Image (cartoon, rainbow, N blue to C red):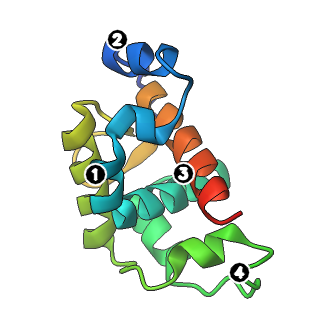
Amino acid sequence: MDQQHPSRPPSQAIQARETNGGPSLLALLGFTKVAAHINELRLFYLIGCAYHEGARSLRQIARVLRTPSGGPAERDPRTRAMGGLPKSLRAIHEAVAVLEGLLGEQLVNRTGEGLGYNGLTAAGERLWELTVEFLQELWA
């Protein structure tokens, strides 16, 4: 049976930054951090996409990312995001850990031991939405 863990609302720090100039990834993290962690953000974008498509563990997401999508990058932003990124389970886990450290927030709901999870927390969902918007603007 799938354990459901209630997700916490995004922290006051995330909400405060959003109200001071509109919601944006740059407002949340700052240009220097976004530039330094662009690969982790691209992986987090792909993690969120996989979760929204039904993936239920980081291991399953790693398997999905190693499978070619077949779509051209100009029509499928996931193909563009994958370019040159490591797609191992370790890389995915490290990307989540780095971003959680930057934000001081849990981004995925853990389901106990190991790497299982049942989705993004409220903070994770918000970061994913901001990352989607940022990448769409970057690639426009």
Where residue 105 sits, quadrant-wise, is top left
Between label 2 and label 1, give the one nearer the viewer: 1
Between label 3 and label 2, give the one nearer the viewer: 2
Q: Residue at x 43, y 72 (%)?
A: 62
| CA gap, disc 4 and disc 1 | 26 Å
**In the rendering, at what x and y percent does residue 113 appear?**
22, 46
- The residue at which mark 4 appears reads as 73
Give the mark nearer the N terminus: 3 vs 4. Answer: 3
**Mark 4, other Cα within 10 Å: few <14 / some 14–19 / many ≥20:** some
Give the mark nearer the N terminus: 4 vs 1. Answer: 1
- The residue at which mark 1 appears reads as 32
| CA gap, disc 3 and disc 2 | 22 Å
The C terminus: image quadrant: bottom right
**Mark 1, other Cα within 10 Å: few <14 / some 14–19 / many ≥20:** few
- The residue at which mark 2 appears reads as 12
Q: Residue at x 40, y 45 (%)?
A: 117
- The residue at which mark 3 appears reads as 48
